[in-house]
Image (cartoon, rainbow, N blue to C red):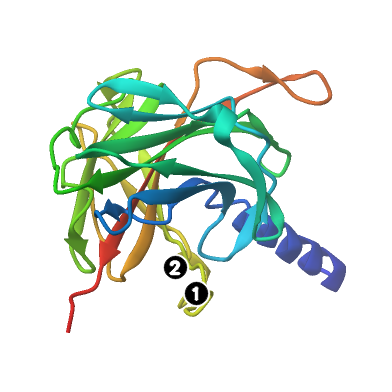
């Protein structure tokens, strides 16, 4: 028969497992559509459980850059340290001068997660459309792993279904888990239960998935795969690496 102590220990371990679920690298701009009235945007880089508002420290990224019309602009030197969810984060400001579809990409330093006995590297990106341009949003950026939108990732309403294709080393990946979370920034909503915090879907044979976003705001998609290499943990042993393809897009409300 399970003793009270054993039961509580088991419950605690399950609790830890639940907390380890749903890591997201985050690249969140102050505006997802740039107009002549709002030409400057602020970008905030962080690492968290976005629905629950639980932050983790984000070391200064290995890379942070902007891509527009295939041209890459390094932004790493513009980052200033910040705080998000009471943990180390980073932010900068970018002036948008001409029409285009602008991608912002963060490659972090490997994050050691002892609760999962694994390193985490999330290649995180978001998109900003400027001055009416809408070309190039469906092109891969050549990341180690990424989600390529099949729905235009701006100008969408809450209730629209987002469709994307997961790439690993440039090729579609079948049967990949994609975790989905709402950025519950103001903590104004709650989940119906623990299972509802992070939604989970899988890609089809062509690496494609679809998810309907019921609320306006920022939604994060994290496609997770195991790397074909290991890294040394703090105790010197070889550990696996979780590669995450992270995409953040915004869904608007209809005007009334």
Disc 1 to disc 2, C-alpha distance? 5 Å
Work out which quarter of the rendered image holds the C terminus and state it.
Answer: bottom left
Which residue position is annotated with label 2? 196
Q: Is residue 157 above or below residue 99?
A: below
Q: Nearer the viewer, residue 148 or 196?
A: 148
Which residue position is annotated with label 1? 193
Mark 1 nearby-residue class (10 Å; few <14, some 14–19, many ≥20)? few
Q: Nearer the viewer, residue 92 or 224?
A: 92
Q: Which residue is situated farthest in the bottom direction here?
A: 256
Residue 146: image location, x then y, percent: 35, 31
Residue 232: image location, x then y, percent: 73, 18
Q: Which mark is residue 233?
A: none
Work out which quarter of the rendered image holds the N terminus and state it.
Answer: bottom right
Q: Nearer the viewer, residue 231 or 40?
A: 40
Residue 167 found in image quarter = top left
Residue 70: image location, x then y, percent: 26, 21
């Amino acid at each position: 028969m399970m003793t009270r102590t054993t039961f509580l220990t088991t419950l605690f371990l399950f609790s830890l497992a639940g907390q380890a679920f749903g890591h997201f690298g985050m690249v969140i701009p102050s505006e997802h559509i740039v107009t002549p009235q709002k030409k400057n945007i602020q970008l905030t880089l962080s690492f968290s459980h976005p629905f629950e508002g639980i932050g983790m420290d984000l070391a200064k990224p290995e890379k942070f850059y902007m891509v527009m019309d295939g041209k890459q602009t390094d932004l790493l030197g513009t980052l200033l340290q910040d705080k998000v969810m009471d943990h180390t984060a980073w932010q900068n400001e970018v002036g948008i001068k001409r029409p285009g579809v602008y991608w912002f990409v963060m490659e972090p330093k490997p994050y050691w997660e002892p609760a999962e006995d694994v390193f985490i590297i999330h290649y995180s990106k978001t998109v900003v459309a400027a001055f009416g341009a809408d070309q190039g949003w469906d092109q891969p950026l050549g990341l180690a792993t990424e989600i390529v939108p099949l729905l235009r990732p701006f100008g969408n309403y809450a209730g629209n279904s987002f469709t994307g294709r997961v790439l690993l080393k440039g090729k579609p990946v079948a049967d990949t888990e994609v975790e989905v979370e709402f950025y519950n920034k103001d903590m104004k909503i709650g989940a119906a239960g623990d299972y509802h915090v992070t939604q989970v879907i899988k890609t089809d044979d062509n690496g494609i998935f679809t998810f309907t976003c019921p609320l306006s705001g920022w939604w994060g998609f994290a496609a997770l795969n195991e790397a074909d290499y290991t890294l040394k943990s703090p105790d010197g042993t070889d550990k696996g690496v979780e590669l995450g393809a992270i995409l953040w897009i915004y869904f608007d409300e209809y005007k009334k």
